[in-house]
Image (cartoon, rainbow, N blue to C red):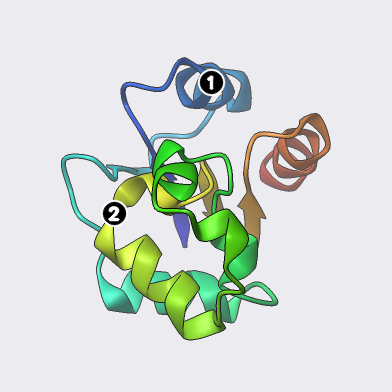
Amino acid sequence: MKKIYYLSTCDTCKRIINELNLSSDFILQDIKTETMTKAQIEEMRALTDSYEALFSKRARLYKELGLKEKSLSEEEYKNYILEHYTFLKRPVILYNNQIFIGNSKKTVESAKLAIHE
């Protein structure tokens, strides 16, 4: 599996995709125009330790809905991600049964190493 879930309107996502120097067999899914399925979210979850790891606490809606004050369950994290694309921490890179979540320098470097080793 060589896939990236990203947002085409996000400059950080675009910069990271350019930095990664991807081969043409990568599938890019713009999560704003092509909604993620329950199966796709479950596939991501299978490669990480929790739905919370996939959840963006920087999303504007996170603050607007007052989720910061709540203690969310795994099922709630999953449902929020399914409900609105902004709750997915981006980009999510799937590569050979490995997952790289988010845009931290360390994550991007790890993804680069895995993809180009």
What residue lies at 26% left-to-right and 63% top-to-bottom? 83
Residue farthest toward the right in the current orientation of the protein:
106
Specify whether 54 is left or right of 66.
right
Which residue has dot 2 on it? 84
Where residue 45 sits in the image (x, y, percent)? 54, 75
- Residue at 65% across / 34% down in the picture? 103
Compare residues 69 and 60 and report the one nearer the observer: 69
Left/right of residue 29 with respect to residue 57 in the rendered view = left
Q: Which mark is residue 2?
A: none
The kind of secondary structure element at disc 2 is: loop
How packed is label 2: few (under 14 Cα within 10 Å), some, or many (20 or more)? some
Residue 117 position (above or below residue 108): below
Q: Residues within 10 Å of mark 1 (few under 14, many from 20)?
A: some
Three-letter amino acid code of the residue under disc 2? His
Q: Position of residue 22 (x, y in %)?
A: 51, 31
Task: Please state if 58 lies on the left or on the right of 109 as rendered.
Answer: left
> At x 39% / y 35%, what residue is drawn?
24
- Determine the residue positioned at 18% across, 48% down: 34
- Spatial CA distance of label 1 from label 2 is 19 Å
Disc 1: which residue: 12
Q: Secondary structure at mark 1?
A: helix
Query: Is residue 97 visible from the viewing direction of this image?
Result: no
Q: Earlier in the sequence, mark 1 or mark 2?
A: 1
